[in-house]
Amino acid sequence: MTTAPKRTYSVEDFSELINARLQRLEGTQEARQRYGGLLAVLRQQVDSYRQSRPAGK
């Protein structure tokens, strides 16, 4: 018997989750001060991925 979750996540689901969490981090002063450079790189990557998706998704 396994205890692994039964639900699988699509790439789109995962992208939306990352974007939502990144927005929350970008909204906190502590995260911006501690991880500003990393947040900027992550934002660039997320935005690049989201722009590369076919229209309508």
Image: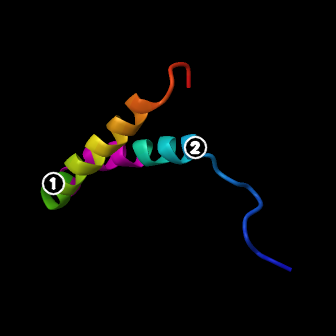
Residue 29 in sight here: yes
Residue at the spot 56% in from the left edge and 40% down from the top edge: 12
Q: Position of residue 45 (x, y in %)?
A: 31, 44
Residue at the spot 18% in from the left edge and 50% down from the top edge: 29
What residue type is disc 2 on?
Asp
Residue at the spot 23% in from the left edge and 49% down from the top edge: 41
54 over 16 or under it: above or below:
above
Using a 10 Å C-alpha cutoff, classify the residue at mark 1 as few (fewer than 14 neighbours), some (14 to 19) or many (20 or more): few
Q: Is residue 7 magenta?
A: no
Disc 1 to disc 2, C-alpha distance: 25 Å
Q: Position of residue 18 (x, y in %)?
A: 44, 48
Residue 51 horizontal side relative to residue 40, left or right: right
Instruction: State which region is magenta.
Output: 21-31
Q: How many marks?
A: 2
The chief SS type of the magenta part is helix
Residue at the spot 19% in from the left edge and 59% down from the top edge: 35
Give the number of the disc on residue 49.
Answer: none
Of callouts 1 and 2, the N-terminal one: 2
Secondary structure beneath dot 2 equals helix
Whether the residues at callouts 1 and 2 have beta carbons within 8 Å, the answer is no
Q: Position of residue 44 (x, y in %)?
A: 26, 41
Q: Quadrant of the N terminus?
A: bottom right
Q: Residue furthest bottom?
A: 1
Q: Residue furthest right?
A: 1
Secondary structure beneath dot 1 equals helix
Residue behind mark 1: 37
Residue behind mark 2: 13
Residue 16 horizontal side relative to residue 10, left or right: left
Q: Nearer the viewer, residue 26 or 16?
A: 16
12 over 2 or under it: above or below:
above
